[in-house]
Image: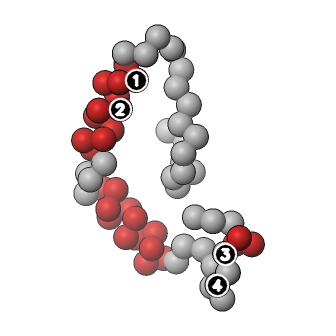
Amino acid sequence: MLPMQKKHAADPGDGKAMVRARRAFLSAGHYAPLMATLAVLCAALPHDHIVDAGCGRGQLR
C-alpha cells in the first residue's frame, strides 16, 4: 500500500479486488499461528506496552 505518488502506474493504489482478496486472506485465519506465537513471546517480555509499527489497514483496535 504505497502512497499514490510512489507508484508508477496509470491507476495506483489498491483496487477493490485487491482489498477484497486481502480481507478474505486475513479472515481465513492464515496468520493465526503466527499471531498466537507472537502473543506468547510478547507476554514473556518485561514491558507493559508493545508498539506495532507495521503495515495494515490503518484501523484502531
Q: Which amino acid, mark 2?
A: Leu
The residues bearing labels 4 and 1 have C-alpha atoms spaced at a distance of: 39 Å
Q: Earlier in the sequence, mark 3 or mark 2?
A: 3
The residue lying at 71 percent from left, 70 percent from top is 6
User: Is disc 3 surrounded by few (<14), some (14 to 19) or many (20+) residues within 10 Å?
Assistant: few
Number of numbered discs overlaid on the protein picture:
4
Would you say the residues marked 3 and 1 are in contact, meaning their CB atoms lie under 8 Å apart?
no
- Residue 30, relative to residue 23: is it above or below? above
Numbered label attached to residue 42: 1
Is 28 on the left-hand or right-hand side of 19? left
Q: Earlier in the sequence, mark 4 or mark 1?
A: 4
Residue denoted by label 3:
7
Q: Quadrant of the N terminus?
A: bottom right
Is 30 on the left-hand or right-hand side of 17? left
Q: Secondary structure at mark 2?
A: helix
The residues bearing labels 1 and 2 have C-alpha atoms spaced at a distance of: 6 Å
Residue denoted by label 4:
9
Q: Which amino acid, mark 3?
A: Lys
Please name whichever residue, 60 or 38, is drawn nearer the observer in this view of the structure. Answer: 38
The residues bearing labels 2 and 4 have C-alpha atoms spaced at a distance of: 36 Å
Is 55 on the left-hand or right-hand side of 38? right
The residue lying at 26 percent from left, 53 percent from top is 30
Q: Which amino acid, mark 4?
A: Ala
Would you say the residues marked 3 and 4 are in contact, meaning their CB atoms lie under 8 Å apart?
yes
Quadrant in which residue 60 is drawn: top right
Q: Earlier in the sequence, mark 2 or mark 4?
A: 4
Numbered label attached to residue 26: none
Q: Which amino acid, mark 1?
A: Cys
Numbered label attached to residue 38: 2
The residues bearing labels 3 and 2 have C-alpha atoms spaced at a distance of: 32 Å
